[in-house]
Image: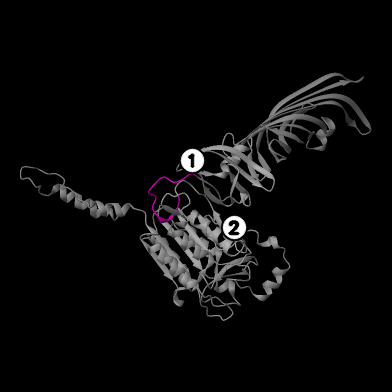
Amino acid sequence: MRCLLPLLCVLLCACAGPSATAGDKGGLVPLRLDAADLSRAYTPRRLALLVGVSSFDDPQWRTLRFSSKDATDLAAALKDPARGHFDQVRSLTRPEETTRDAILEALRQLRREATRPDDVVMVYLSAHGTLARDGKGELTRYLVTRDASYRAIPQTALSMDALKAEFEQLPSRRRLLVLATCHSGSGKSLLPRELEVELAGIKSGFYARPLEESSRASMVFAASDWGETAREDEGLRNDIYTYFLIEGLGGAADRNADGAVTATEAHDYSRRRTFTFTEGRQRPSAEILEVGADPVILAGRIDRTGQPELFSYNPRLDGFLLKVDGEPRLELPGGAAVGPGRRTVELTKGDAVLVRREVDVARGDRLPLERLLADAIPRRALSLVGGMISFADGKSQRELLPAAPQVGVVLRLEDLPLQDLGLMLDVGVGHGRKKLQVAPGSEVPFGYTALTLGAAVPYLWRWERLTLFAGPRVAALYLGRSFDVEAFSGGQRYFTVSPGVVGGLAWRLGERLELTAQGHGMLTYVVVDGQGQAVGFIGGNAGVGYRF
């Protein structure tokens, strides 16, 4: 508000002041703004912070030959008007710039400078990585800063949690974090001896995923997969991943030929080249929250409509082979450009075909492969189930209805009424004969008919072939009993509609068939011997479903 007051005073003075024409009684003075200045004020900025840590105070950390050079070489590519054309590039390579506090302060300064949601922000770190147990005893990843102590890693090194916490506070939606480091105990990594001994007894799957929760940041690229080694190379005179990343910014990574190199294009290019150069020993990885239609451009400018692209960075599809018109294109994650027109797209692993679809793609299209997978799996399932129903408490079981078998049908509609919600309708019926215990040692036979009708709107959790669901349910219960004994002959009927809950799972056996199981409970109101009471009514079933 304070910044608006001077402008308001200027405008008021302009209105009250003399006009350019003597006969005028007042008017606004024309405000002339330079069009170029106005354009620059509203143009998103491109900022980068690059850190290369080569030397360390503690001699236990091996000196890295090219970390400083990595940051310097990448800075040159980003500053180049013909390549990155970044507005501001800051490199931290001197000893006083590569301490933990200095790096954190540089990130905070970057947050004060990159204030627009559409600013492009890149943070790059080339350094040692290590693992250590934090104050809670949990195994955590750390970046080794110049002042990190080998014997006091949690207290002196920069934890990935702290780094990502600062990174996530950047206002920009177009932000990229690149980690040219590893935590495997070799290459650009070093582990304390006692931790090496501990990890030696852990199976290889320990490193299958990051040790802390995935970042909410837009993109996080790493020079190697978790548990692998990130390497420097004497011939390339760079970190291997960084060398090919810079090479890709020169235009080689522009797979869709639109004139610009996006962050994902640059990473995919460097990933493939690094994998080939190291003969499969180093596989760069990526954590990507979302890849939309507004890509993060690292180099060049979009000056023409690009070729159609097919891509996926979803961990669910890692390792699947993308085929286009029967021709293998790449192993996911990653992306590929294809010719416009009608294409047959397949995702396969070994002899298994996950999805095969024909799609129409035009120039400029970017098609996430998860969309094909979602479209390929039917979102409706009709299941034939069998199970049991019963009152929850023993008294009601003895006096009203013991546990009884039931068969039924369940219809489940997924992503209705909203994404990740379902609509479930179920019908169950049971019929037979049971015995009531009216007194100790005294039983009365009776016939029964039980009918349940339910409707639920559960939330869906889906992973690979498994779908879990849980949510609120409303159910109607009809219970009829008939007696044919000397003391009483006749029937009783009871009907109620009550709230409840449902939960269960479905496991897909193939494209159409699934196994399903669910349990439900409802709170109902019954009258026994003229006395009304609220009781629980529960049920469970399992069966086979058909997706359509």
The residue indicated by pointer 2 is 213
Locate the C terminus by quadrant: top right
Closer to us: 209 or 376: 376
235 with respect to 15 (left or right): right
Q: Looking at the picture, how far across and down is residue 317, in whole percent?
A: 62, 49
| Residue that lies at the very extreme toward the top in this rendered image | 490
Q: Amino acid at mark 2?
A: Glu
| Residue that lies at the very extreme toward the left in this rendered image | 22
Q: Residues within 10 Å of mark 2 (few under 14, many from 20)?
A: few
The residue indicated by pointer 1 is 340
Q: Residues within 10 Å of mark 1 (few under 14, many from 20)?
A: some
Q: Earlier in the sequence, mark 2 or mark 1?
A: 2
Q: CA distance from mark 2 to mark 1?
A: 39 Å
476 shown above or below 137:
above
372 shown above or below 237:
above
477 shown above or below 145:
above
* Picture residue at 72% right of the left edge, 34% below the top: 545
Secondary structure under tag 1 reads loop
Q: Is residue 147 magenta?
A: no
Q: Main secondary structure of the magenta part?
A: loop
* Picture residue at 38% right of the left edge, 53% below the top: 301
Q: Which residues are magenta?
A: 295-308
| Residue that lies at the very extreme toward the right in this rendered image | 441
Q: Looking at the picture, how far across and down is residue 66, in whole percent?
A: 50, 73
Q: Amino acid at mark 1?
A: Pro
Q: Is residue 456 visible?
A: no
Mark 2 or mark 1: which is in front? 1
Secondary structure under tag 2 reads loop
Q: Looking at the picture, how far across and down is residue 393, in whole percent?
A: 79, 37
Q: Looking at the picture, how far across and down is residue 96, in whole percent?
A: 45, 76
